[in-house]
Image (spheres, grey):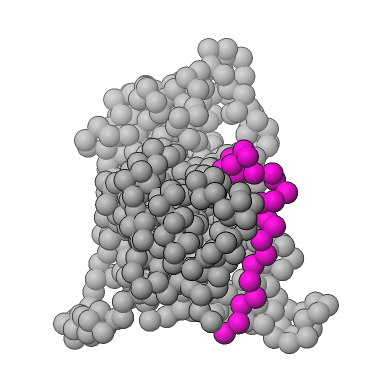
Amino acid sequence: MPSVNSGELNNLLLAISQTLSDRTQLASTMDAILAAARQLTQAKHGIMYVLDQTGQALVPLSVHKHEQAIIDHTWLPMQLDMLKDNDPLGYAITSGEIVLINDLYTYSGYNCDLIYQNEAAMGLHSANLLAWPLKDHQNLTVGLLVLFDLCLIDDEQSLSVFTKLAGTSIRQATLLDTYHTSMRNLEADNAALNRENQQLKARKKPNYDGPIAESEPMRQVLERLQRILTLPVDVLLRGETGAGKEVIARYIHDNSNRSDKPFIAQNCAAIPEQLLESELFGHKKGAFTGADKDKIGLFEAADGGTLFLDEIGDMPLLLQAKLLRVLQERKFRAIGSSEERSIDVRVVAATHCNLMDKIQKAEFRADLFYRLNVFPINLPPLRERQDDILPLAEHFITHTSQKMQLDSEPVLSKKARKQLLEYGFPGNVRELRNVIERAVLLSDFETVDALELGEMDTFIPADIPEETIFEVELPEIDAGSLKDSVNQYERDVIIKTLERFNWQTRKAAESLAVPVSTLNHKIKKYEITP
């Protein structure tokens, strides 16, 4: 392996440090570091990985092949918890030690299969490899420098100085990017601030169910959101189905400076691929069969406001590419149109999927993931929010009581509270809401006592034949209130049950899963007689 003269190395360091000090954007800094590292080592190829904001994955931000920067490459992000110790890149980043392999295709000390696959895809067959962890002035890992087909350096100390400089430069570039972004959005004179204050004072109370955050995990979520509510930053919400991602998306919108503009939600899994593109971007009359008039897409409809894209992980790959372009350029083109339109839309995307797994399976674009993952929010499942369960339940009781036009709200019994706190809620907040609404309907409208948790068929009393469960038909609804209709239905159910048990209230109460006192109260309330 040829070597690089240490005198040449020292002469390069000053020029490199000056180059890096002039870079304020992370991508440019990474490209400059890789170019300088190749110059120092005479490497033909190289990769610069940077640790993402979550600290859980390495992103290939700059790739050089034959001394030229390339965009289309096969190197994927590396998730730290999935890296193997015998992978040379994984070992370097997890151990913090330098890895040098002189004979890449004959050395057996590491498992280099992933490197071989990527080299084959790029048409390369490198002789050697150097993987050097990059650390900042606080000795915190910020990235990984990987070089291929390089020359041996006879002054390793000088390269150490360079990599330390590179790590510090990456940290500074990251901080500068963050600082400049903040400054651009905070620059406003006193008049603009006064106008914003007046808008905040005049803002109406949101008419949706806002997030309840009595638990520490949810308080941390809202505290994290406070940093970007008024900044033009896209957000990625990750969490289980039913965890309340749309509620958080609405919270972001209604507490931003876009609150007087539209909030539009779209589930990407709910519409077939051939219709989703038209739904998002619109189409011109005659663009395809059935397009008998112009259609405005959701991006255009949400201009100035917020577009919530739920289940983004299920978006087809072709649309992912078009979405990425819109996010990068803030421009789109309707189907059948030759005219580009600029838009100002904040995108809040959500998914319950593991997008890194989908990237590995080529089902989701890595570049779109890292474009959306600028500000990720992980929503905890309800089982990790014990302190929120009862406040949420009481909130849903209030909401249901208002819909049913009840004179007063029923209260949760001690037994019901215990049941709620002991249940795991696999369906999360959505399941809790359904449980409470059903319990209010089945209550005496004074106390919520009987809760149906889990699968519905587990709550059918064993002594009631299955064919009799749905024998009572819903009453015809005239112009009366929902409360009147519910009362009539409940009266019919009670009468049918009493008749089946020959008017024995104890057996009827057991079949209806309510206390005898509750059944007697309802019999009196509805003036039911044999």
Farthest-out residue, top: 108
Q: Position of residue 93 (x, y in %)?
A: 40, 28
Q: Is residue 366 visible?
A: no
Depth check, front residue: 227 or 516: 516
Residue, x 46% and y 43% (percent of image)? Answer: 425
Query: Does residue 365 appear left or right of residue 251 in this picture?
Result: right
Q: Quadrant of the C terminus?
A: bottom right
- Whether residue 244 is situated above or below residue 420 in the rendered picture: below
Q: Position of residue 94 (x, y in %)?
A: 39, 26
Query: Does residue 63 appear left or right of residue 272 in this picture?
Result: left
Residue 478 painted magenta: yes
Depth check, front residue: 47 or 501: 501
Residue, x 28% and y 60% (percent of image)? Answer: 227
Q: Is residue 82 visible?
A: yes
- Whether residue 396 is situated above or below residue 134 in the rendered picture: below
Secondary structure mostly seen in the magenta stretch: loop
Among the 4 quarters of the image, the one containing residue 406: bottom left
Q: Position of residue 389 (x, y in %)?
A: 35, 49
Q: Position of residue 529 (x, y in %)?
A: 53, 64
Q: What segment is highlighted magenta in the picture?
A: 458-479
Residue, x 16% and y 82% (percent of image)? Answer: 190
Residue, x 29% and y 81% (percent of image)? Answer: 203
Among the 4 quarters of the image, the one containing residue 141: top left
Query: Does residue 369 appear left or right of residue 399 in this picture?
Result: right
Farthest-out residue, front: 530
Depth check, front residue: 242 or 367: 242
Among the 4 quarters of the image, the one containing residue 320: bottom right
